[in-house]
Image: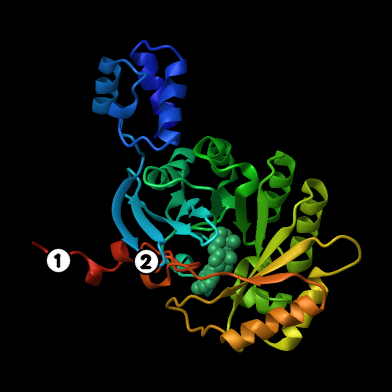
């Protein structure tokens, strides 16, 4: 829902200001059309249905994996592609993974999104409409900004969208914003006062390798990024998650686990928790670490005082897993729907 346009449309119709709130509350509870909004006058419902689309996004395609993961491909009004994913977990969590940009201007070598063309930042309404899409069919409990794009490069819209999430049923404590380590964004998030969680995509325990994998490291090197994360933790008192994608023969050696533990450890309270991510295949020339290698890496971290978990892989068969979002179908002519 274009929330500004909603207010304007209602004002033009001479409606009182509280109507926008009513419409929003219906949407946040999963209403799929204006007809369902029974506390709005019938004539107004009909007028809104004529004048104001329920979503800023057009759903182009939706796929579902055997594990229950759903991936939706949307287009904005100006035909920019983006994807969002909803995941179900055995403990009952239902997590939605949102995109903050169409494409991504950063060029992390192992990530499929980095290889598609960057289009633009998404508006707050376009971000929230991704969540509303899934909310129409299922309740949601968690949200991660781990879809396409770098949230810190579009932080105003991301924060504006975050402000709406509790209405949808996702409290701020259950929201995670993931970043490549864009320090000004980490600092602003710390200042924002929102109790959301911060995740840092780290992927290497030393600068030379990290710069190779993630060119952004040239601009914001490791020690500065980790210092910003420690400052975030000091302000917000929440563990920072470190994401570390496991690449065979690249960053998965025992010594590298020790180096990572040294980097993240230190005196006093534990700041970091590592989330090891099995590599999901993209077009890049990497191989994922074996299960055994991931297990040893994890053991080395925990033995040295750094808590670590291995991320459950969801939705790989529909290219919905971490790093696989690339709006591929829209980009590849060979995969275009056959003519009738
Ligand atoms: N730009 C932000 C938000 C995207 S989060 C960030 O990078 O943090 C997406 C996560 O998936 C990041 O941690 C990213 O490094 C990771 N990722 C990217 N490509 C991947 C791949 N092929 N396999 C597994 N994880 C990947």
| Observer-nearest of 256 and 218 | 256
Of pointers 2 and 1, the one earlier in the residue sequence = 2
Tell me which corner region of the image, top left, top right, bottom left or bottom right, holds residue 102: bottom left
Which residue of the protein is positioned furthest toward the right in this rendering?
A: 267
- How many C-alpha atoms fall within 10 Å of the one at disc 2: few (<14), some, or many (≥20)? some
Q: Is residue 168 above or below residue 202?
A: above
Q: Is residue 336 left or right of residue 69?
A: left
Residue 214 percent location from the top left of the image: 60, 71
Who's the residue at 43% across and 23% down the image?
22
Residue 44 percent location from the top left of the image: 29, 17
Tell me which corner region of the image, top left, top right, bottom left or bottom right, holds residue 302: bottom right
Label 1: which residue?
338
Q: Quadrant of ligand 1?
A: bottom right
Numbered badge on residue 65: 2
Q: Secondary structure at mark 2?
A: loop
Q: Is residue 60 above or below residue 48?
A: below
Q: Is residue 32 above or below residue 200?
A: above
Q: Is residue 238 above or below residue 261?
A: above
Who's the residue at 73% across and 65% down the image?
273
Residue 305 percent location from the top left of the image: 82, 73
- How many C-alpha atoms fall within 10 Å of the one at disc 1: few (<14), some, or many (≥20)? few
| Observer-nearest of 203 and 163 | 163
Of the 4 image quadrants, the one containing the N terminus is top left
Q: Secondary structure at mark 1?
A: loop
């Amino acid at each position: 829902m274009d929330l500004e346009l909603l207010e304007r449309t209602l004002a033009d119709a001479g409606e009182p200001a509280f109507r926008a709130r009513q419409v929003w509350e219906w949407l946040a509870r999963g209403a799929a059309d204006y007809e369902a909004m029974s506390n709005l006058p019938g004539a107004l419902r009909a007028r809104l249905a004529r004048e104001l689309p329920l979503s800023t996004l057009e759903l182009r395609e939706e796929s579902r994996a055997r594990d229950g993961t759903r991936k939706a491909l949307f287009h904005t009004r100006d035909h920019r592609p983006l994807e969002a994913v909803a995941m179900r977990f055995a403990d009952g969590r239902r997590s939605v993974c949102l995109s903050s940009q169409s494409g991504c201007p950063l060029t992390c070598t192992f990530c499929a999104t980095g290889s598609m063309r960057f289009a633009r930042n998404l508006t707050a309404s376009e971000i929230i409409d991704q969540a509303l899409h899934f909310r129409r069919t299922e309740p949601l409990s968690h949200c991660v900004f781990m879809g396409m794009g770098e949230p810190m490069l579009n932080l105003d819209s991301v924060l504006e969208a975050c402000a709406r999430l509790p209405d949808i049923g996702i409290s701020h404590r259950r929201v995670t914003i993931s970043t490549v380590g864009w320090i000004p964004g980490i600092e602003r998030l710390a200042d924002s006062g929102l109790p959301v969680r911060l995740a840092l995509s780290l992927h290497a325990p030393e600068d030379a390798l990290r710069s190779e994998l993630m060119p952004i490291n040239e601009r914001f090197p490791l020690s500065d990024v980790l210092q910003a994360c420690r400052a975030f933790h000091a302000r917000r008192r929440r563990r920072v998650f470190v994401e570390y994608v496991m690449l065979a023969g690249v960053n998965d050696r025992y010594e590298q686990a020790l180096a990572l533990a040294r980097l993240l450890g230190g005196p006093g309270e534990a700041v970091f928790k590592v989330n090891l991510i099995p590599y999901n295949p993209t077009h890049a020339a990497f191989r994922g670490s074996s299960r055994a290698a991931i297990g040893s890496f994890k053991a080395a971290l925990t033995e040295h005082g750094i808590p670590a978990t291995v991320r459950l892989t969801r939705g790989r068969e529909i290219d919905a897993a971490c790093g696989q979002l690339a709006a591929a179908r829209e980009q590849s002519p060979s995969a275009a729907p056959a003519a009738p």
